[in-house]
Image (tube, rainbow, N blue to C red):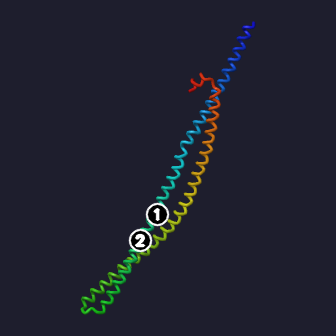
Amino acid sequence: MSGVNLFLESNDVMTDQIRENLEILAALQRADSEYDHLSRKLEGVDDAINALAEQLSVFQGQVDQGLLQLETLQKQYRADEGEVKRIESAIARSNEKLSSVKTNKEYQSMLKEIDELTLKKSDMEDRLLAMLDDIEAAERQGAILKADLADMSKEVQSRQDEIRQSAEVQRKSLAAIGEKRNDIWTRLDAKLQTLYS
């Protein structure tokens, strides 16, 4: 009877050892799964930060484009304004010459020239008024875009900081899981370590 008891006790010890090894293997597998999950999340951190920076960069480009259009309008306005002044000077010179004209034909020619210059000046002034409206609208739009850019810049910075902080927490968790896994690994039988690997 003692041989049977010895056999049963040996089976109980063996069963306990198998159960313990299975529990260790299950704990190891959970630790590896957690580690892999966190590692994958951390791989996307730089991509998420870069994607936010890219969004900001694209919007910055749109703002720059709007400001460049405003600058172009302002330059054109100044050039046209200079042209109006040149035309006014030409009209004034023509009016001065008008009093010194000797023939009727010259007089009619000078009047025609003055009328053409006056008409051209009027057209240019109308164009300047329309350009002023465009410049004012572009300035308002530029101010809105600058404010939106400042808001977006703050938002992007805030979100990037949140991502970095979250990543730091995940890195610490990853390190803790790594330590936990190493502790579990050392408790596992060498043969099972080889099989698990």
Query: What type is the residue that disc 1 sits on?
Result: Gly
Query: What type is the residue that disc 2 sits on?
Result: Lys
Residue at the limit of the structure toward the right, as seen here: 1
Q: Residue at x 46, y 62 (%)?
A: 64
The residue where tag 1 is placed is 66
- Indicate the quadrant where residue 119 lies: bottom left
| Secondary structure under the numbered disc 2 in the rendered image | helix
Mark 1 vs 2, N-terminal side: 1
Distance, label 1 to label 2, CA atoms, is: 14 Å
Residue 30 position, x and y percent, is: 62, 32
- Placement of 32 over or under 5, stated as above or below: below
Which sits in the foreground, 194 or 106?
Answer: 194
The residue where tag 2 is placed is 75
Q: Residues within 10 Å of mark 1 (few under 14, many from 20)?
A: some
Q: Residue at x 43, y 65 (%)?
A: 69
Is 10 on the left or on the right of 107, as rendered?
right
Residue 19 position, x and y percent, is: 67, 22
Which sits in the foreground, 68 or 5?
Answer: 5
Is 47 on the left or on the right of 88, as rendered?
right
Residue at the limit of the structure toward the top, as seen here: 1
The N terminus is located in which quarter?
top right
Residue 9 position, x and y percent, is: 72, 14
- Placement of 37 over or under 18, stated as above or below: below
